[in-house]
Image: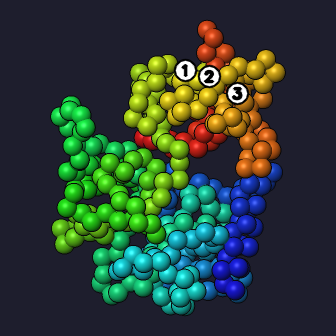
Amino acid sequence: MKKRLMRCLSLLLCAVLLSVPALAAEPAAAETAGRGPVRVWGTVTWLDNGGLLVENSNTSDPLHEVILHGESIICLDAVTGEPMDLEQIQDGDTIYAWVGSAMTMSLPPQATAQVIVANIPADYAVPQYYEIASVTPQAMIAIYPPPALTWTEVTATDGTTLRITDQAELTPYRTKNIVRLEDLIPGTGILVWPDAQGQPERVLVFPYAYQGYVSVTEEGLVIVNGGVLSRKAKVSQDGEMLLPVRAAAEILGLQVKWDPAQGAVVSRNGETVLTAMPGGTIQGMDETGTAYQVPGTCVLEAGVTYLSQTALLQLLNLYPAA
């Protein structure tokens, strides 16, 4: 029952957040600083409507009271890392939770929970959830095949830098796949248990939710999944970052063609992924094959179609790496 209420409230919260432009006179939601998950913690109280109120004693913390909702919350035991049923959490329990950066402006604010860690023993070093924003891997000798990494350094969206070595225990979440240091790429979610010195000792690696990651250097070089595109990015007169559609799509193994009526058409195995008409409509395709419009800018310059970075990343499901 609690799960069902949490799911309904999550859908309601999404509706509220999506309706923000229509409520400009009195904003209903705001983005917290940063683009990754935000940590909240405290003791919990189940509300009658199925929400989970989290409160801590640090009144200087702007998020010392938060109401959590969520449809697909990952709830884990703090010690074992094993999945828990959300209903196992009782009033008065202490939890740590990581929520999306979009929250309602109500008091207390309401947010969608992504990960909850519960069953926390007293004085226990609680594992922390991070979303990897960038990676600085170990420099390796240029030989083929390349040897396995013995360490990698990742920077999370909250600015935390972690050096993870091959001595750490890496395990996948709910699969039997083998995970390696090489699998820790931008956009990956990880739960990290520290050792006595505060260094990563155990790392739970969550399934990758993206098709890849993209970063743009100060010189305009576009890097997709570690490979540099043959075309540089452009900046529009309005300061918007534009990426070359064909180069980005083809490095991902997608097909690109030009259609006079639709503009650039990107497809995967014959199924249209997106269409972008310079100066016109930008569209994606949902799982049912229904087209939907995406805001953004599309221009054609010297035979190259460029698309807003935000639109292209959304349509190709790419992570914006730091």
| Location of residue 307 by image quarter | top right
In front: label 3 or label 2? 3
Any part of residue 108 in sight: no
Secondary structure category for the residue under label 2? strand
Horizontal and vertical percent position of residue 320: 50, 41
Q: Residue at x 18, y 68 (%)?
A: 197
Secondary structure category for the residue under label 1? strand
Q: Which residue is mark 1?
A: 234
Q: Residue at x 61, y 74 (%)?
A: 67
Q: Which residue is mark 3?
A: 265
Q: Mark 3 near mark 2, Cβ–Cβ under 8 Å?
A: no
Tell me: residue 265, above or below residue 313: above
Secondary structure category for the residue under label 3? strand
Q: Residue at x 54, y 33 (%)?
A: 253
Q: Amino acid at mark 3?
A: Val
Distance of label 2 from label 1 (alpha carbons): 8 Å
Q: Which residue is mark 2?
A: 306
Distance of label 1 from label 3 (alpha carbons): 20 Å
Residue nearest the viewer, comparing 178 with 217: 178
Distance of label 3 from label 2 (alpha carbons): 12 Å
Quarter of the image where the C terminus is located = top left
Q: Amino acid at mark 1?
A: Lys
Q: Amino acid at mark 2?
A: Tyr
Chain-order first, disc 3 or disc 2: 3
Residue nearest the viewer, comparing 8 with 290: 290
Colour setup of the view? rainbow
Chain-order first, disc 1 or disc 3: 1
